[in-house]
Amino acid sequence: MKIYAHRGSSGDNPEMTNAAYQAAIVDGADGFECDVRLTKAGEIVCIHDATTRRIAGKSLRVSRSDLFELRSVYEFMTLNELLELAISAGKDLLIETKHPTMFGGRIERKVIELLDSNAERISLAGIEVIVMSFSKFALGRVNSKWNVCKVSKYYLPARFSKQRISALDIDLISKHPGLVAKVSGKGSRVLVWTVNKKRDLKLCKDLGVDGVITNYPKVARNYG
C-alpha cells in the first residue's frame, strides 16, 4: 500500500509548502499529493481553495492574483517547483486540478504542457505522475497522454467509473467496504483519501487498497 502525503505532511506543517513536502520525504511518503489552480498570469500554483482566506487569513482570489501577490501572504509553491522536488527525491506525484474555474480546460492544458516538457526526466527518475479530478471532462483532456484518476465521493460514480485509477473518500469506504473489491475487480487501482485515523489506515490495509492519501505519512508508514 503506497503512502501519499496529502498536501505534503500537512498534519504538522502548513499545507502545500516546501516545508510540508520536505517533511513528507523525511516521513517516508512514497509520493506527494497537491491541488492546482492557475493565477491570472497562467502560473500553476499549488492551492486547494479558490482564495487564500483559509490558509493565509487574508483573502486573495487566485485567478485574479499573480504569483508575487500570492506569495506576499503565503509560502506558495508552483507545480513546477513541486515537480522538481518530486523528481529529485524520487517521489510519485498526484496532481488534482480544481474546478469549476474561470479558466475552464486551460488548467489541464497547462499541466500537460509542464509534464510533457519534463517527460524524459520523469521517466528517468522512475516516478509516476497521475492527474486527478472529480470532473470526467477534465480527465478527458489529460487521458491520452498521462495517467488519470477519477475522484469520487459517492457510491454510484465510484461503482461505475471506467477509469483505471479511482480515488475514493474514506467515509464512503467506511460505509461500503465492499466497494473496494467491486472497483478493483474491474481492473482499477484504488486510492483512498483522506486517511488520517489509525482505524481507517488499518481498514484500508485490510481491504487491500493500492494507496492512501494522508496528512500523516509517518503514521501511515506503519500500515503500508
Image: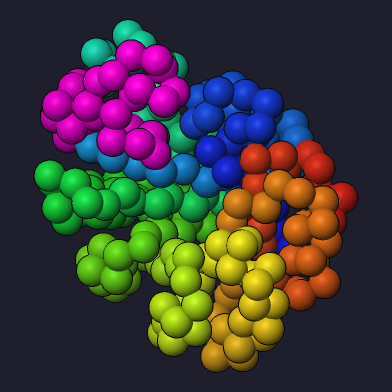
Residue 68: quarter of image: top left
Q: Name the outermost residue toward the top.
A: 72
Q: State the residue at coordinates (35%, 36%).
A: 49
Q: Quadrant of the N terminus?
A: bottom right
Is residue 104 highlighted in magenta?
A: no
Q: Quadrant of the C terminus?
A: bottom right
Residue 6 visible in the shown view? yes
Task: Please indicate whether residue 13 sits to the left or right of residue 150 in the image.
Answer: right
Q: Which residues are magenta?
A: 39-66
Residue 123 visible in the shown view? no
Percent of width and height locating residue 100? 22, 51
Classify 181 as above or below 24.
below
Q: State the residue at coordinates (12%, 44%).
A: 102
Percent of width and height locating residue 4? 63, 50
Percent of width and height locating residue 18? 53, 24
Percent of width and height locating residue 59? 29, 19
